[in-house]
Amino acid sequence: MFEQYDALIFDLDGTLVDSMSLHLEAWEQTAAEFGLPFDRTRIHGMGGIPTRKIVAFLAAELGLDIDVEAFTRRKVALYLASIDKVRVYPQMWELVKSQYGKRPMGIGTGSPRRHVEQILRQTGLDAYIETVVSADDVDNHKPHPDTFLTVAARLGVTPARCLVFEDTEIGLQAGRAAGMDTVLATDGVLNQQPA
């Protein structure tokens, strides 16, 4: 299935690891504390965009005066309190292990580097993933292609020869904008053939 690709690139949260529910619980509690209406489906759909950018966008859209940095600190603190519960989705674990040594693999995520590194260490994924591009490494986050283009560059592969695994439309848009084939993986399950 992957023979035509020189590299595989994974989104992290909700694609490779089961962390989106923890993010969404932290979002819901923080939104209630700060008076921001919470729409679980919409926030999930913005996966791949850093928290502070989402809060700033929603506050502006709704005309609310919210301290973006305080909101972000609180949401992150709530998430980190449960980060040790994060696990790799079984089907994705099998995929990663089956492709290890055959082609390089990287992660392109909207999460901060320190969170990503903690998850990779505690799950054991750090032994399989060659490079990580986090929210700290690019200015233009998903749906812009920068995250995935940077992963390809670090892996030394042509973007058109990469396959991106994503769980959100924003992430799929970023992969397509990078000139890469994409595949939707929801809750760690591949929902389609690469396109």
Image (tube, helix red, strand yellow):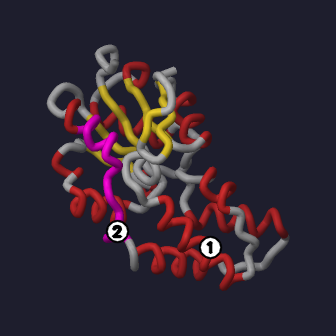
Q: Residue at x 66, y 85 (%)?
A: 33
Is 168 displayed left or right of 162 in the figure?
right
Query: Which element carries disc 1, helix, strand or loop?
Result: helix
**Mark 1 closeness class: few <14, some 14–19, many ≥20 residues within 10 Å:** some
Quarter assignment of residue 43? bottom right
Mark-to-mark CA distance, 2 and 1: 18 Å
Q: Which mark is residue 68?
A: none
Q: How many marks?
A: 2
Residue extending furthest top? 4
User: Which of these two is toward me, 192 or 121?
Assistant: 192
The residue to which callout 1 is attached is 28
Please tell me whether the stretch drawn in magenta is mainly helix, strand or loop: helix
| Residue situated in front as seen by the camera: 139 or 126 | 126
Q: Which residue occupies the foreground of this view, 146 or 120? A: 120
Q: Is residue 141 above or below residue 74?
A: above
Image coords of residue 188 (percent x, y): 41, 44
Residue 183 located within the stretch drawn in magenta: no
Q: Secondary structure at mark 2?
A: helix
Q: Which residues are magenta?
A: 83-96
Q: Residue 85: which disc?
A: 2
* Residue situated furthest bottom in the rendering: 33
Query: Which residue is at 20% across, 43% downward?
Result: 128
Would you say 184 lies left or right of 6 here? Answer: right
84 in magenta: yes
Q: Position of residue 147 (x, y in %)?
A: 46, 43
What is the quadrant of residue 42 in the picture? bottom right
Residue pictured at 51% horizontal, 43% vertical: 167
Where is residue 34, by image quadrant?
bottom right
Q: Amino acid at mark 2?
A: Lys
- The quarter of the image holding the N terminus is top left
Query: Closest to the observer: 31 or 22?
Result: 22
- The answer to whether marks 2 and 1 mark residues whose Cβ atoms lie closer than 8 Å is no
